[in-house]
Amino acid sequence: MNDLLIRGRVLTFVREPQGMEDSESYRFYEDGAVLVGGGKITAVGPYGDLAAAAGERVQLIDHRPHLVLSGLIDTHLHFPQTQAIASYGAQLLEWLNTYVFVEEQKFREGKHAAFIAGRFMDELLSNGTTTAVAYCSVHPESVDAFFTAAEERNMLMIGGKVMMDRNAPEALRDTPQTGYDETKRLIGKWHGRGRAHYAISPRFAITSTPEQMEIARALVAEHPACYVQTHLSENRDEIAFATSLYPEARDYTDIYARYDLLGRKTLLGHCIYLSDREISVLAEAGAVGVFCPTSNLFLGSGLFDRDRFDRLGGRYAVATDVGAGTSFSMLETMDEAYKILHLQGQRLSPLNSFYRMTLGNAQALGLEHRIGSLHVGADADIVVLDSRAKSAMELRMQVASSLAEELFVLQTMGDDRCVAEVYVAGKPMKRATGRVVAARERELELI
Ligand code: GUN
Ligand code: ZN
């Protein structure tokens, strides 16, 4: 394949922005370009310089006046809940029992899992998300479907089989032994294959017995290169139930700490009601709290206190949490993040939002050398954003006078319609029609 020269208004971050005016935190080329070869970025800079240096065989794709950024990253969502979005009326535990534990039973069927996995990946791509960290269901078939769909699209994806051996329907329960055996087999099969990474996934303290938590401890010790994902402190009833099941633990965080599940590769969804002590424990371990704004509003869970994480040195990431989260769009997610922080008197600058969706989330995953920014040697996962995709945006943009203002319009008014193109390892995945290529091909296969 020829090298690609992707031309547009190129924006990439080099560190976390400290306020609205922090122009040292990013690089912006008004007429810029990214040169791509062999699935990697081989040069980034002003278009004139790159065009002059590029060889004869380069294929030019001109995206002006759109913005060209590193592909967006989602650090927490549930692929088996793709058809459970918008399930009405319940808070966390009732919502899980009424809707989610019913929906997830369908993933016993490999065919269903494969169908949803394909649509799930395409939905991510339509929204400009090129990497995500996902929970699969308890069934190993769902993990095979998940990584197969990612591999077909060459996406860097992180995921794992949920482990749960109590407080769930019989059909969704594994045992400490089968949870161990199946997880171990899936790690052997998928972790490090192509762009796949495995996440050891005890769902949360409520659905794992102490015996299964011991098993999770063993798996983490045996596979330190894998991620660990679970849920922590999302809802007051959940906290009361979890801590009642582990009476020896000081608090909810201590349950996971006691089983050595907190480390730099651990992602903890929600983290809303943590004490200062608990945030300090996470900070000490380098574990990552995951802020899921649309989910936290949808389930009426509560407000993530970002400033306390910052003050106590806690690491945090941002995520959609589909299907409690109501959108696959990281733009819509950051719109809600802005409002949640605003309600608490905290500010989220547009620069910080875009940093969070890209380099910030890559750093939370320890993958900043490969994804999250446009640098030489990075994987060529790239999103192209159109700030005028809707008529109301076009009108608003007529009076926008700075890059930060444009980013704020994109975040506040934007959605998948703003994703003009998305590249995965240098391959364009979305056509002008707005449909993702693979989705169409899949449907043709099914007919
Ligand atoms: N806690 C345990 N499982 C889940 C889940 O599937 N979604 C959310 N939002 N919280 C959880
Ligand atoms: Zn979740």
Image: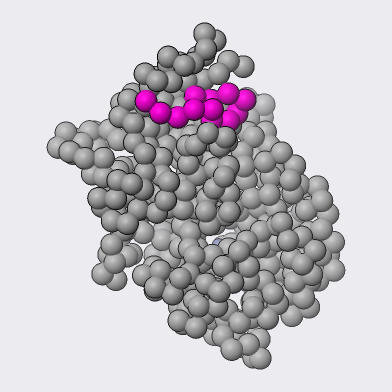
Helix, strand or loop: magenta stretch: strand
Q: Quadrant of residue 418?
A: top left
Furthest-bottom residue in this view: 248
Q: Nearer the viewer, residue 133 or 371?
A: 371
User: Is residue 91 visible in the rendered structure shown here?
Assistant: no
State the quadrant of the N terminus: top right
**418 w.r.t. 215: above or below:** above
**20 w.r.t. 114: above or below:** below
The residue lying at 27 percent from left, 33 percent from top is 388
Q: Nearer the viewer, residue 114 or 45?
A: 45
Q: How is the image coloured?
A: one colour
Judged left or right of residue 24, residue 80 is right
**122 w.r.t. 243: above or below:** above
State the quadrant of the C terminus: top right
- What's drawn in magenta, residue-wise? 35-46
Specify whether residue 43 is painted magenta. yes
Q: Quadrant of residue 44?
A: top left
Q: Residue 52's spot in the image, x, y percent?
A: 42, 14
Q: Quadrant of residue 416?
A: top left
Judged left or right of residue 151, residue 338 is left
Specify whether residue 91 is painted magenta. no
User: Is residue 265 visible in the rendered structure shown here?
Assistant: yes
The residue lying at 54 percent from left, 27 percent from top is 42
The residue lying at 35 percent from left, 53 percent from top is 17
Q: Residue 376's spot in the image, x, y percent?
A: 53, 33
Q: Residue 147's spot in the image, x, y percent?
A: 70, 44
Q: Residue 71's spot in the image, x, y percent?
A: 48, 39
